Amino acid sequence: MILTPKELNDQKNEFTVIDIRPGEQRNEFPVDGLETVVVTEKDINTISGKKVLICQFGIVTERVILTNNLEDTYSLLGGVQAWMEFQSDQSDLSRWSRQTVLPEIGIEGQKKLMNATVAIVGMGGLGCPAAQSLMSAGVGKLKLIDGDIVELSNLHRQPLYGVDDINRLKVEVAKDRLEQLNKNAVIESTDEYFNKENGMNIIEGADVTIDATDNIQTRQLIDRFSKEANVPMVYGGLFRYEGQVAVLNVNGSPGYSDLFPDPPSSGETCEDAGVLGMLPGIIGNIQALETVKLIIGIEQNLIGKLLIYDGLNHQSEIIQL
Amino acid sequence: MININVKCFSQVKYAFGKDELNLELEVGATTLDLEKIIREKADGKLDTVSLRIALNQKYIPHETELKDRDEVAFIPPVQGG
């Protein structure tokens, strides 16, 4: 059973709080605002009543409860890391404890995500999984733009939509679904196609723009505004079982116009060439992953590189731009 | 003669039905010579497709002389999303 820092704070008089961390860790990361007892794993059962186990990240405690089949015993979600954050500014980040435990992310990285704005151009096969993953990861604000409506043939690859949504505006349905993933996030939706008139308004002010469009002309326009506003562009494209991802226009790094200079010939769209739903799922999620890395500042990334992924043989190639 | 390994992506892969081609070229052949050969071999299937060329996993904007055992990738733009 799990208890969040806020829940523990509200009911702390009802529990015995047991710190199961090793002494060295207890000394390095003391717990403020809680009266704790120190007990080894095998002696937890000697304490009667309702108990909360705490460890550094809330992972060891879950294992201890399961392994020892402990009753009336809860694990503090996110552990001491999340508790201390809650103590300092009352923000409960425990729902992201499985990613804040990663050293590259941590509490500071999570706060960067929560303060970030991501623009997503196109809410189709790439936009749906990208938006879903970014919302779940805790990104604070999404700006969605798409003038399209949901059609039956979209459903196999656009998991935010269902049969009851047919003929509704994609951005409207997406906003409803995404808000259920994180009620504190802000979602701005624009029910128009991205164009010369509205483009700058969408991209300006965002930390990253995701190109989730299905045509080269719009991609070129995103590239132009991305350069003008100095907002990085995470490009994604598909052809049958193959996908491409590149992180473009980061402080003068190569852009789409360097990748494919004017005027590239038009390949087929997903509607023309066909696509299995998993492929945009994979590529849209790689775009979301690169977006998170850009926001947090993780150095291994696709800036100035083109990733080509083949879903048939699972081979990938990275080309230096 | 020099041996060149050609990696095929997207429309190029479908034009040849293969992930890779191994070609033997004259010494002194360039990337553009190779592109011409590839287009001819594709029998019209790549006539309307623009191709970017990567040599040994690096984009090259200009015509470059090939060396024995170079790897050349032909990368078309893709639309879908």
Image (spheres, helix red, strand yellow):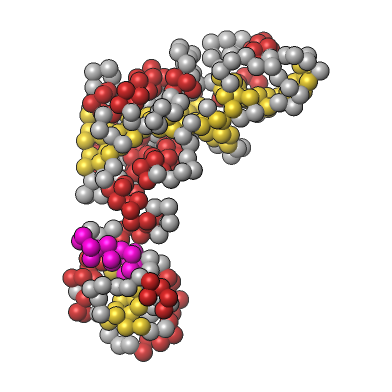
Q: Is residue A6 left or right of residue B39?
A: left
Q: Is residue B26 left or right of residue A182?
A: right
* Quarter where residue B1 is shown: top right
Q: Residue at x 37, y 75 (%)?
A: A27
In magenta stretch: residue A76:
yes
- The answer to whether residue B59 is visible is yes
Q: Is residue A11 left or right of residue B65?
A: left
Instruction: Estimate the x, y position of residue A137 in percent, counting from the top left.
Output: 34, 49
Q: Residue at x 52, y 27 (%)?
A: A321
Q: Quadrant of the C terminus of chain B?
A: top left
Seen in the picture, residue A269 relative to B40 is either above or below; the reply is: below
Q: Residue at x 38, y 69 (%)?
A: A56
Instruction: Estimate the x, y position of residue A318 in percent, counting from the top left.
Output: 56, 34
* Quarter where residue A80 is shown: bottom left
Instruction: Estimate the x, y position of residue B18 in percent, counting from the top left.
Output: 66, 26
- The residue most toward the right is B1
Q: Residue at x 25, y 80 (%)?
A: A35
Residue in front for this viewpoint, B48 or A248: A248
Instruction: Estimate the x, y position of residue A65 in percent, counting from the top left.
Output: 40, 75
Residue in front for this viewpoint, A227 or A121: A227
Magenta part of the protein: which range? Answer: A75-90
Q: Main secondary structure of the magenta part?
A: helix
In magenta stretch: residue B78:
no
* Quarter where residue A11 is shown: bottom left
